[in-house]
Image: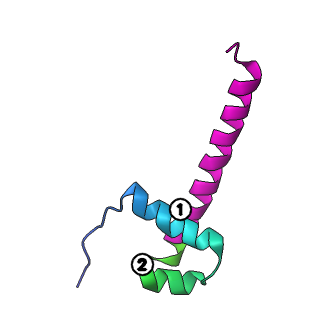
Amino acid sequence: MKRTRRNHTAVFKAKVALAAIRGEKTLAELSTQYDVHANQITQWKSELITRSEERRVGKECRSRWSPY
């Protein structure tokens, strides 16, 4: 039987991605624990890393060039 499409909250995605970044469990273990595919975890992990780098660079640019 086909499973209905699930929508995950941003908080859930961040929680899973941070668990993957910590590296305490394998992707297979995290996949089983959170009931999502390992490829999805990898995608969320890379998205979290990319967005956090963008925010860090953005803050550095603002602090360097801001007149305040």
Secondary structure found at label 2:
helix
Q: Identify the mark at residue 44; answer none if there is no mark.
A: 1
Please give the name of the residue rendered at 63% of the width and 69% of the height, measured from the top-left corner: 21
Q: CA distance from mark 1 to mark 2?
A: 13 Å
- Please state the horizontal and vertical placement of residue 34, each as a whole percent of the image: 42, 78
Q: Quadrant of the N terminus?
A: bottom left
> Magenta stretch: residue 46 in it?
yes
Q: Position of residue 66 (x, y in %)?
A: 70, 17
Disc 1, disc 2: CB below 8 Å?
no
Q: Disc 2 residue type?
A: Tyr
Q: Point out the stretch of residues depicted in magenta.
A: 40-68
Q: Is residue 67 above or below residue 30?
A: above
- Helix, strand or loop at label 1? It is helix
Q: Quadrant of the C terminus?
A: top right
- The amino acid sitting under disc 1 is Trp
Residue drawn where x is 57% and y is 81% of the image: 27
Q: Is residue 35 magenta?
A: no
